[in-house]
Amino acid sequence: MTVRPTPKLVPFLVAGVLAALVAAVVVVLVTGPSEDYTVAASIGYLTFVLSLATVSVAAGIWLFLERRSRRRTRTYTATRTQNDPS
């Protein structure tokens, strides 16, 4: 039996989107919204644009950690035992 502790991908991607959302809120509140768009539309657009970069970085970090976890792969020998009903 081979056991390898690998990180899950989805939490890294969600963290990337949340980082993009926080950055978008900060940018819109500091610079102010565009005259043509509302605050929510500006935050939504910037979140989408920044998500492209942050999700890519998060996936790269996950890939680095996943490859590094290959060193921690362990192989165990397991034997089946009979269950005694008594």
Image: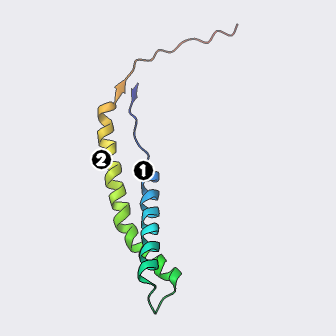
Q: Residue at x 35, y 26 (%)?
A: 74
Q: Amino acid at mark 1?
A: Leu
Which picture quadrant has residue 3? top left
User: Quick one: label 2, few (<14), some, or many (20+) residues within 10 Å?
Assistant: few
Q: Counting residues from the N terminus, which is met first, the one under dot 2 or under dot 1?
A: 1
Q: Residue at x 46, y 92 (%)?
A: 36
Q: Residue at x 29, y 39 (%)?
A: 68
- Quick one: which residue is furthest to the front in this view? 30
Q: Amino acid at mark 2?
A: Phe
Q: Residue 26, position in %: x, y?
A: 44, 73
Q: Quadrant of the N terminus?
A: top left
Inter-mark Cα distance, 2 to 1: 12 Å
Q: Residue 71, position in %: x, y?
A: 29, 33
Question: Disc number at residue 9?
Answer: 1
- Residue located beneath label 2 in the image: 64
Vertical comparison of 23 with 68: above or below: below
